[in-house]
């Protein structure tokens, strides 16, 4: 079973509290999401493999440890997941970026795919799937289904806010996937929005509501 990691770092908790506030501006919301993603990425990349490499400093030759191949892919779930990409790329700038487009059917609350474009060598890469909200879990499950169909095996899911229902659904469908969460919330409401949550992350990122 993959692990579920809920962050308790003071900076992540503080910045997550700020994005919850309804008066937070679009610019500030966007900047904070990027910052939180970068802070989360520091821990989420802890298990990346290293290899010994010989280099030359201004003083002498020495052996150091560096990332083994940097075979990393970042896959945001459109559109809200895009807000987390730059934070991750600040840590791993050579990562390839794929995209999975899903929207939630307003009546069934189930995800519907409209776009999927991944690196051709996704099967050999450590994949980080990004989506600010893990509500019902439907979008995350569907996105990871698509990614696995392309051959990916090493997948980590990262989100800002998660519901207990979403965590359970994702674990049930993909028990091999580690889940990194900035904050675990109370529950879903009757419209499948997270409470207390932060509203619609996509609308708040792009000012569309």
Image (tube, rainbow, N blue to C red):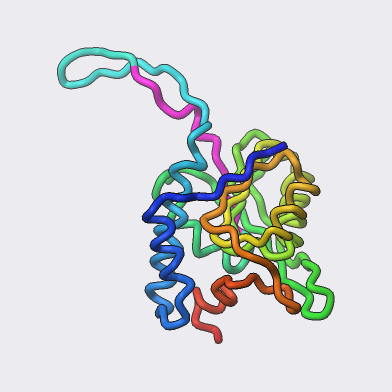
Task: Judge left or right: residue 191 versus residue 158.
Answer: right
State yes or no: residue 66 in magenta: yes
Image-quadrant location for residue 154: top right
User: Dividing the picture into quarters, in which one does residue 108 lie?
Assistant: bottom right
Q: Say which residue appears at 72% left-offset and 37% top-offset.
A: 1
Q: Measured along the vertical axis of the image, is residue 51 above or below residue 147?
A: above
**Residue 46: image x %, image y %?**
48, 35
Point 57% across, 62% down: residue: 161
Q: Give the range drawn in magenta.
A: 64-76
x, y percentage for residue 192? 73, 73
Q: Position of residue 23 (x, y in %)?
A: 42, 83
Q: Does 95 appear above or below 202? A: above
Residue 110 x %, y %:
80, 69
> Is 134 a magenta residue?
no
Q: Residue at x 51, y 56 (%)?
A: 182
Q: Is residue 28 above or below residue 175?
A: below
Q: Is the magenta stretch mostly helix, strand or loop?
A: strand
Furthest residue in direction bottom, as rendered: 209
Question: Seen from this angle, which residue lies furthest right?
Answer: 108
């Amino acid at each position: 079973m993959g692990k579920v990691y809920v962050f308790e770092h003071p900076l992540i908790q503080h910045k997550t509290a700020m994005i919850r506030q309804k008066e937070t501006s679009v610019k500030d919301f966007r900047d904070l999401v990027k910052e939180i993603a970068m802070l989360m990425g520091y821990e989420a990349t802890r298990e990346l493999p290293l290899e010994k490499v010989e280099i030359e400093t201004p003083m002498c030759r020495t052996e150091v440890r560096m990332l083994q191949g940097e075979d990393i892919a970042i896959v945001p779930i459109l559109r809200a997941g895009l807000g987390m990409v730059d934070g991750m790329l600040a840590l791993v700038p050579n990562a390839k970026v794929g995209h999975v487009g899903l929207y939630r059917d307003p009546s069934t609350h189930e995800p519907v795919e409209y776009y999927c474009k991944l690196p051709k060598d996704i099967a050999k890469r450590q994949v980080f799937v990004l989506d600010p909200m893990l509500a019902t879990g439907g979008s995350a499950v569907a996105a990871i289904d698509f990614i696995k169909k392309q051959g990916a095996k090493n997948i980590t899911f990262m989100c800002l806010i998660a519901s207990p229902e979403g965590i359970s659904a994702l674990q049930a469908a993909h028990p091999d996937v580690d889940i990194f969460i900035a904050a675990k919330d109370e529950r879903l409401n009757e419209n499948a929005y997270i409470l207390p949550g932060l509203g619609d992350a996509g609308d708040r990122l792009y000012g569309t509501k």
